[in-house]
Image (cartoon, rainbow, N blue to C red):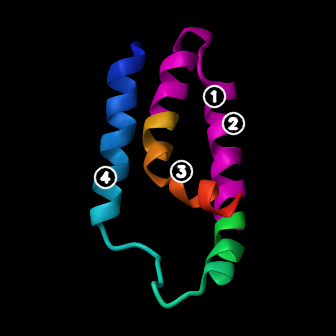
Amino acid sequence: MRRPLPAFVAGLSSHLVMDVMLHWGDERLEWEEFVEVARVDGTVGLAVCASALASAPRDARVPMAAAILGACIIDMDKPCRHF
């Protein structure tokens, strides 16, 4: 996508679709156990996002960043709660 708003919506939508699919998660984990897993998951996610932005053509970087923001914004409560 070449425009930020549709890219943001696509990122947000993809997160919502993935959240309804079966994926890892264990609600029995205590907060500290969850944070241990989230550290690795978040580090890998940041590396993938940085790689995607770095490899995107210059004119696609803003829409790429908007898509990443859209995909990540739903779960920002967790790092905010931690920090």
Residue 69 sits inside the magenta stretch? no
Q: Amino acid at mark 2?
A: Ala
Upstream in sequence: badge 1 or badge 4: 4
Q: Which residue is mark 3?
A: 76
**Is 55 inside the magenta-drawn segment?**
yes
Mark number, residue 50: 2
Tag in front: 1 or 4: 4
Query: Which quarter of the picture shows residue 9?
Result: top left
The residue to which callout 4 is attached is: 16
Q: CA distance from mark 1 to mark 4?
A: 22 Å
Q: Residues within 10 Å of mark 3 (few under 14, many from 20)?
A: few
Local secondary structure at mark 2: helix
What residue is drawn where x is 71% and y is 75%?
36
Disc number for residue 24 = none
Q: Is residue 43 left or right of residue 65?
A: right
Pinpoint residue 38: horizontal percent, then vertical percent. Answer: 64, 67
Quadrant assignment, res 23: bottom left
Real-space Cα separation, disc 2 to disc 4, in angstroms: 22 Å
- Tell me the amino acid under the disc marked 3: Met
Horizontal side of residue 50 vs 69, given as left or right = right
Check disc 1 and report the residue beneath it: 53
Task: State the extent of the magenta-drawn residues as a range.
Answer: 40-67
Q: Which of pointers 3 and 2 indicates the residue nearer the eye? A: 3
| Contact (Cβ within 8 Å) of mark 1 with mark 3 | no
Question: Residue 82, how many percent across, how many down?
Answer: 67, 63
Q: Is residue 71 depicted above or below 42 in this figure? A: above
Percent position of residue 34, x then y: 61, 77
